[in-house]
């Protein structure tokens, strides 16, 4: 594996600052929501992809690439099972 800059946050570890209405207020002098006028705070959100480090492991060899694909598939399958279980609980109510 090779350590590279995260492509989601471009190596900063943060994905920006968004208002309560979803407006991008990164770098604004004031932290007021342009849509509703509420005070939002000026803390940037930590990137979920690199957990705020700004770096990720990038697979290089065919074996590492295949292992990463399998890992992602397992995570997707587990998330689908959780969603299906939740939907069956909700629909039975």
Image: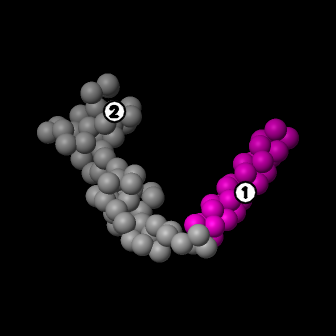
Q: Mark 1 points at which residue?
A: 77
The quarter of the image holding the C terminus is top right
Per the image, is 26 magenta?
Answer: no
Camera-nearest residue between 60 and 77: 60
The relative height of residue 84 versus residue 77 in the rendered view (above or below) is: above
Choose the circle earlier in sequence order: 2 or 1: 2
The relative height of residue 2 versus residue 38 in the rendered view (above or below) is: below
Q: Mark 2 points at which residue?
A: 23
Q: Mark 1: which secondary structure? A: helix
Q: Is residue 75 left or right of residue 26?
A: right
Q: Do the residues labelled 2 and 1 touch (CB within 8 Å)?
A: no
Query: Residue at 45% across / 69% down in the picture?
Result: 57
The answer to whether any part of residue 65 appears in the image is yes
Q: Position of residue 87 (x, y in %)?
A: 77, 43
Q: In this view, does 68 lie to the left or right of 86?
A: left
Furthest residue to the front? Answer: 62
The region drawn magenta spans: 65-93
Q: Residues within 10 Å of mark 1 (few under 14, many from 20)?
A: few
> Which of the 4 quarters of the picture holds residue 24?
top left
Query: Residue at 28% across / 32% down in the picture?
Result: 33
Camera-nearest residue between 43 and 38: 43
Furthest residue to the top? Answer: 35
The answer to whether any part of residue 71 appears in the image is no
Query: Residue at 50% across / 69% down in the picture?
Result: 59
Q: Mark 2: which secondary structure? A: loop
Per the image, is 89 magenta?
Answer: yes
Real-space Cα separation, disc 2 to disc 1, in angstroms: 33 Å
Q: Where is residue 67 in the image (x, y as percent from the top left)?
A: 63, 70
Q: Where is residue 80 in the image (x, y as percent from the top left)?
A: 73, 51
Residue 66, labelled with which disc? none
Query: Residue at 63% across / 62% down in the picture?
Result: 69
């Amino acid at each position: 594996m090779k350590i590279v800059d995260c492509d989601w946050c471009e190596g900063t570890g943060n994905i920006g600052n968004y208002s309560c209405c979803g407006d991008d207020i990164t770098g604004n002098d004031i932290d007021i929501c342009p849509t509703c006028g509420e005070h939002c705070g000026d803390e940037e959100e930590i990137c979920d992809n690199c957990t705020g480090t700004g770096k990720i492991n990038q697979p290089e060899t065919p074996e590492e690439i295949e292992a990463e694909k399998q890992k992602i598939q397992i995570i997707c399958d587990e998330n689908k099972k959780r969603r299906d279980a939740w939907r069956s609980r909700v629909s039975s109510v």
